[in-house]
Amino acid sequence: MSFKPALGAGFFVTTPDLLARWWGPHGFTNTFHEIDITPGGAWKFTMHGPDGRDYPNESVFVEIVPMERVVLEHLSEPQFRVTATFEEEKGRTKVVFRQTFKKEKQVEQIKQMCINGNEENFDRFGQLLEEMKSGTAG
């Protein structure tokens, strides 16, 4: 395993251990094989579903502007680009998360799954942030 720190990428809570705790829908866990949260850096991991299935993932970080934007290219099927932007709004951080798929016909097939999964992802992220704020994150 090789890991490089995020250097303030913000969105990912900067460490692979914390990212692994919230990435993915409810019931999923992760095993990170490689993560280099720098432009051009690889992110290879396996998501373990609650049904016992494993989902290998490979991505590359395209752009990182600390506390402003993270762009990554998901190389595994389905292929897509994620752009996450962060804006201050009334003393809080607004996160805008966009996925652009390579194959248009895949969008309709997995659209609802992606919407639901991403919402669960952010629920888990918010829960981790609350735990970190209260000192119970472990």
Image (cartoon, rainbow, N blue to C red):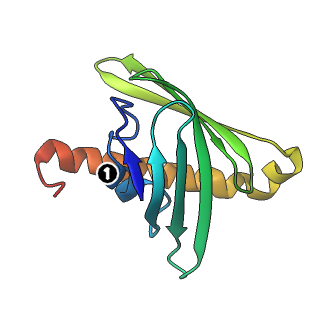
Q: Is residue 136 left or right of residue 116?
A: left
Label 1 Cα crowd, 10 Å radius (few <14 / some 14-19 / many 20+): some
Residue 93 or 42: which is nearer the viewer?
A: 42
Query: Which residue reaches farthest left?
Result: 135
Amino acid type of disc 1? Answer: Leu
Give the percent coordinates (x, y) of residue 132.
Answer: 19, 46
**Relative depth, front residue between 18 and 59:** 59
- The image quadrant where one finds the N terminus is bottom left
Judged from this view, the residue extending furthest toward the bottom is 52
Horizontally, is 110 left or right of 96 in the view? right
Quick check: 90 left or right of 70?
A: left
Q: Position of residue 2 (x, y in %)?
A: 41, 53
Residue ID at (47%, 68%): 28
Seen in the image, is 91 located left or right of residue 118?
A: left
Q: Is residue 135 above or below residue 49?
A: above
| Percent position of residue 13, x then y | 33, 40
Q: Residue at x 51, y 49 (%)?
A: 119
Q: Residue at x 39, y 40 (%)?
A: 12
Q: Which residue is mark 1?
A: 18
Image point (40%, 23%), residue name:
66
Residue placed most toward the observer, 105 or 75? 75
Q: Residue furthest front?
A: 2
SS at circle 1: helix
